[in-house]
Amino acid sequence: EHKASLEVVSLLLSSWPDALKEKDTCGCTPFAIACIHEAPLEVIYLLLETMLKTKEYRHCLDLKFAKGQELTDDVTNLVSHLSTILNDDEVSLTIANDTVDYFINGKMWYCVFLVINKYPAITKTMELHVSEMPDFLSMVGKSCSLTAMWEVIINEQELLKDA
């Protein structure tokens, strides 16, 4: 069985980003197909990050494909963490922390910011140095809702103490 390399998938997405919305005869998106057919994890991450960074593709991220599938442990773990941020259920700060750590370790930055968007208080546990805050807040401002940005700032009062 042939699997597309990261370079091929990256090239395809740069020339045809709407490929993310395409579905096969079973209704699976490229992300689901990659997960089911054990594509390299970096290809799965690329598909996921590309879907998440573009709002018009986020609706294509449906995790229903995972039910009843025998997925690799890596993909099962990824789907579990994704469901934490995509479900409407509230989770504990511990679970949210585990999820953000998982995405940081995988360098899946759009996933990190989705967690922050849903659980802005989590930034207080990230132990960011004050010198890192301007870049961090810039990314939060670009990637999260205004409400999330406001809550992040409220949780970082030491930034405002000398203002």
Image (cartoon, rainbow, N blue to C red):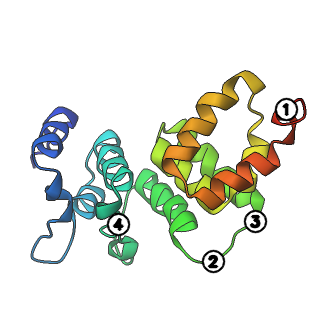
How many marks overall? 4
Q: Which residue is mark 2?
A: 89
Q: Going from the N terminus, do you reach mark 3 or mark 1 first?
A: 3
Q: Amino acid at mark 2?
A: Asp
The answer to whether mark 1 and mark 4 are in CB contact below 8 A is no
Q: Name the residue nearer the viewer: 6 or 141.
A: 141
Look at the numbered disc 3 and give the secondary structure of its residue: loop
Place of residue 98 in the rendered image (x, y in percent of width and height, measured from the top left): 67, 51
Q: Which mark is residue 92?
A: 3
CA gap, disc 3 and disc 2: 10 Å
CA gap, disc 1 and disc 4: 42 Å
Q: Going from the N terminus, do you reach mark 1 or mark 2 first?
A: 2
Residue at x-position 9% and y-position 76%: 25
Residue at x-position 11% and y-position 70%: 24
Question: Which quarter of the rendering shows the C terminus?
Answer: top right
Q: Which mark is residue 8?
A: none
Residue at x-position 64% and y-position 51%: 149
The answer to whether mark 3 and mark 4 are in CB contact below 8 A is no
Place of residue 26 in the rendered image (x, y in percent of width and height, measured from the top left): 15, 78
Q: Amino acid at mark 1?
A: Ala
Badge 3: residue crowd in 10 Å (few <14, some 14–19, many ≥20)? few
Would residue 61 appear left or right of 128 to someone viewing this image?
left
Look at the numbered disc 1 and give the secondary structure of its residue: loop
CA gap, disc 1 and disc 2: 37 Å
Q: Going from the N terminus, do you reach mark 3 or mark 4 first?
A: 4
The answer to whether mark 1 and mark 2 are in CB contact below 8 A is no
Q: Which residue is mark 1?
A: 163
Would residue 74 appear left or right of 28 to someone viewing this image?
right
Q: Name the residue nearer the viewer: 99 or 123.
A: 123
Look at the numbered disc 4 and give the secondary structure of its residue: loop
Place of residue 46 in the rendered image (x, y in percent of width and height, measured from the top left): 31, 44
